[in-house]
């Protein structure tokens, strides 16, 4: 049993019925456990850190409602937390109404401002003349519709279901294909076992000099490790340093990844390991070059031992 | 006269009274010109592209109301636009009320959900028991207060002023020091003149192979150019490529920057120049190493000419 | 007419009949010109520098008689000289005797000590019991045989011919396949025209810091240029610097090579161009990657001009 | 006891009285042991490989008499040999005569052709009109003087001493400061203990592609290891590969050096370790950066263990 990946008390960026809850459902079987919505990303992370929750689900990239920098910064600072799973959720907006309401009868529509922005064209075309109303979340809009305050909500399918609403239209985003990436985080503990198609996340802080990032990245490239994401982050607290948030292919249990991270630990001002977990974006990691595979490292280590001992 | 930096018709991410308008005011003297709020980042960029506006102001990093990925992606795709200026605006929230209202008398408070999230602790402490109400923007909340719909708004100082409100409290953000970076964009035209402390922005698309990013970055490092921001961007349209959004120190008129960009143009799948403009974050660029200064490039070019001609 | 590649007065590492003369014959049609042997590599280079000769032929790698460091150092220091041609000559030793002498009748054999060392096994097997005698050059040994001082000489075929000797045996080196590389040098002047399969030689001096060589080499790698030779050279005169002698593929007239050399001129303590000349080792240069071809540089330069002018 | 560094039967590039013997004397106390001259570098190496000798001394760089490529290639191929010591010997030429002979009385002078070349100017000035005679070694010339065959020899001081000659003049090289580097080699066995100022030698074979050398060198640079020598070597036997002969600072027992060599073992076609031994050129290694010191590696390894175990 892996405590870190089989928690029973889940926190998530609420309220109920938001995309984060949909992501949580798709990620883990929360059957025997509890799910508690939290009002913000920091509150969700705090619940995990304090032990009130075993794991927390928060958006990391391209979220509709959550502020993603909040997640980045929330993981980079404070007590350590480890990502144990990633979840990719298509951003699919539904126009939800009380059962029986027809499109003609819709006189008001509400949602989180970002959701309204992402469905603006559909709303103008299909609900012309109606000024969308802001809500604090897509789920809050659905709840308000259920309560009779508005006629329609732009929300996730899960919110329609939860509040007993009907979907008048699905997939109403102006641009199809948007995806939000969520991560499930826990306090440090046994890592998810390598699956052969994993990612590793970390934050590295380097001195502010030309070429510092280059030196950092070559530790990956020299070991045949591809990056899947990199983002510089402002570090206002500490002048003269730069912080980078990175995802790379592979698991820290892989020798190439472990050695690369140990090298970063030496050459960077600071490195925070944020977890190794199964890749879930539907892609396969790049094939590992023969010279970067575990057995190549093992063989090289054996050779070094022999040479050092004078046997060769 | 530089048309690109002295436009007369400005668009900005509206509505009036938002942080974007405050940033616009701090950035340019719009005295003889017009300012037109636009409902979204894409709408603001579209107004500039179509010629309806000469320049547009949009948030690029850490914005309260605007969705920053919208700006990144909006500049990377579509007809070319050039950044001619950057503006850093402290995220300073004000609690605005109708003149005469005291804190005790506040029974309702409204704002954009992100602004409410960033002032949550202050609101809990100072307005306990009051559930904040969402608005589509901080300025919309201020307007609603002016109209008597709510008692207080969390908004920018400019919104309080514009709607005839009074500030009951300033700087009520839970975390001090947050800054939003805005950029002013125009259609291609004469670039802002180098000032000696400039930044250059670009988007580079590289093939999906280990080390591709390293090859890209070494074009900067080899010429003594520091990066100030890097962010990988998903490119869903094109499989097998990665896109990076970058800011570096220096102006494209500098030889080191020009040669680096020309090198990227050769080795990348695609490079989009997004402008060279005065650095405005209050920092000075790193000193340019002697071997990367313009006269070092000039001297090397002269040497090469002499050698090629057989004179040496 | 290219003065630098069509000289009429040739100097070479003598004496007559050595491998250097054979290399000169194979390299250039000296028909209407003169050939003057010089006693040493420095003397040969000095003759060219002073104008006594138009061109000089000296060994650069793996020579039998000449001291190769003398050539390396002789080109790196002093007035500039330019390599206009390289010549690869198989090290083919002949056992030369006066006409009519049979192997049985050979009682003494002479040659340069290095030639004796390289044919030691053959001599032991075929002339057992005979102690080889040193000569100051292979040609001097041949001359001594012609003069009746010794019975046989280990020398180049050209020496046998020149001194009226007969070859009792050819290709008597213990290890087949050795090749000596010679270069023809001139005072600076018009360079040999690019042929599409050229090499460029240079000496680069860099500061004594970890990574200095790496920075130097990446100027080549970043432009798709392969090295064919690299050698660190002691620089006793100047503490704190390292000197490297390099050959790379391509001609300085190629844009990738020119730009790489100009970059070295900026970042190195010193760069001395030693010539661009047709590759003569029977190999083809690596295919030039599309992004490093001349038209890619031209296209990138055009793009940069357009971007700088504000046209894009 | 370290068999590899305390051998009792020494072979060296002969004959007796050459610079190699002088180097051997300066390198080791051969008191209770034997010294056997060998006729060539290959013969010296073969004596060690076969067990006829415990250690062999051969020139590696800038030798007067020995052919240095012979040493490079002789160590790169064949059964493994390990360098256990390096010796730097100033190239100091003496004009040696039989006791009582004055300079005026010298009518003939002999030496190895390379020694004659390096003292040519002195001989012309001080012995005008006398044509130097070749000998197979500087020591052979001294022996011939002792035997009355010639009047003077250009040789090492040790040869004068050994053959009962007197030095008429010392330090007669045209260019002062030349130094020859010799190495003492043994069959594999316990390595010399690290001294804090060591060098490591190796041969690396890499595929023939642009950037292969760069990838090799960055394994050193990334770990703060400076190179002190690099030389590309022809590999005629195997097409499509390049061979490099390298010396770097540090001992293979150092973690940074060990890890760098293990990395080369993974990424190169072949790596041959040629020994770690005390630096003897009178220079100190570059200070090891803090992040490349042994304890930084140890600390990083501990951190990695903790992270992998889930403790952080």
Image (tube, coloured by chain):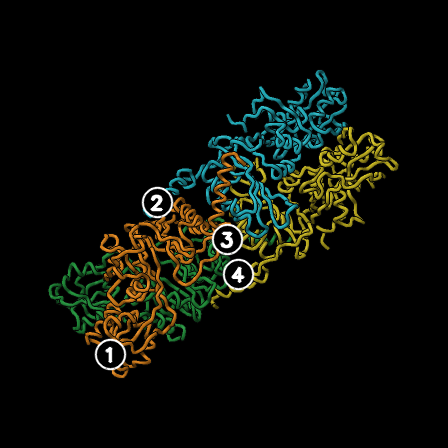
Chain colours: A green, B orange, C cyan, D yellow
Q: Residue C200 placed where, x, y %?
A: 52, 36
Measure the C-alpha gap from mark 4 to mark 1. Answer: 59 Å
On residue C306, which mark appears?
A: 2
Q: Nearer the viewer, residue C160 or B87?
A: B87
Q: Which residue carries the number 3 mark?
A: B289
Q: Residues within 10 Å of mark 3 (few under 14, many from 20)?
A: few
Q: Is residue C84 left or right of residue D285?
A: left
Q: Residue furthest right?
A: D100
Specify the quadrant of the image occupied by residue B150.
bottom left
Chain letter belonging to callout 2: C
Q: Residue D30 placed where, x, y %?
A: 78, 48
Instruction: Classify mark 4: helix, strand or loop.
Output: helix
Chain letter belonging to callout 1: B
| Circle nearer the viewer, 4 or 3 | 3
Q: Residue furthest left?
A: A104
Instruction: Classify mark 1: helix, strand or loop.
Output: loop
Q: Which residue carries the number 4 mark?
A: A266
Task: Same chain for labels 4 and 3? Say yes or no.
Answer: no
Q: Nearer the viewer, residue B26 or B257?
A: B26
Q: Residues within 10 Å of mark 2 (few under 14, many from 20)?
A: few
Instruction: Classify mark 3: helix, strand or loop.
Output: loop
Q: Which residue carries the number 1 mark?
A: B99
| Circle nearer the viewer, 4 or 2 | 2
Q: Residue A307 placed where, x, y %?
A: 62, 51
Measure the C-alpha gap from mark 1 to mark 2. Answer: 55 Å
Measure the C-alpha gap from mark 3 to mark 2. Answer: 27 Å
Measure the C-alpha gap from mark 3 to mark 1. Answer: 57 Å
Compared to A170, does B160 lie above or below? below
């Amino acid at each position: 049993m892996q405590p870190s990946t089989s928690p029973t008390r889940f926190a998530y960026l609420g309220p109920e019925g938001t995309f984060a809850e949909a992501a949580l459902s798709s990620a883990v079987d929360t059957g025997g456990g509890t799910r508690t919505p939290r009002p913000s990303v920091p509150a969700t992370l705090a619940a995990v850190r304090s032990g009130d929750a075993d794991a927390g689900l928060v958006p990391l990239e391209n979220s509709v409602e959550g502020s993603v920098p909040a997640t980045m910064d929330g993981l980079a600072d404070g007590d350590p937390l480890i990502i144990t799973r990633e979840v990719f959720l298509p951003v699919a907006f539904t126009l939800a109404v009380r059962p029986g309401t027809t499109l003609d009868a819709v006189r008001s529509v509400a949602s989180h401002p970002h959701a309204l922005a992402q469905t603006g064209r559909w709303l103008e075309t299909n609900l012309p003349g109606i000024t969308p109303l802001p809500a604090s979340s897509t789920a809050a809009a659905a709840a308000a519709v259920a309560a009779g305050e508005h006629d329609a909500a732009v929300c996730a399918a899960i919110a329609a279901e939860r509040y007993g609403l009907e979907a008048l239209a699905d997939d109403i985003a102006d641009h199809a294909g948007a995806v939000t990436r969520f991560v499930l985080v826990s306090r440090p503990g046994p890592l998810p076992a390598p699956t052969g198609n994993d990612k590793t996340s970390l934050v590295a802080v380097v001195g502010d000099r030309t070429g510092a990032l280059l030196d950092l990245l070559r530790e990956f490239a020299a070991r045949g490790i591809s990056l899947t994401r990199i983002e510089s982050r402002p570090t206002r607290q500490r002048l003269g340093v730069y912080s980078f948030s990175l995802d790379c292919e592979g698991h820290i249990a892989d020798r190439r990844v472990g050695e690369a991270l140990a090298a970063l630990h030496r050459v960077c001002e600071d490195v925070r390991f944020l977890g190794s977990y199964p890749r879930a974006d539907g892609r396969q990691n790049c094939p590992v070059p023969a010279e970067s595979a575990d057995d190549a490292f093992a063989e090289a280590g054996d050779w070094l031992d022999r040479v050092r001992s004078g046997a060769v």
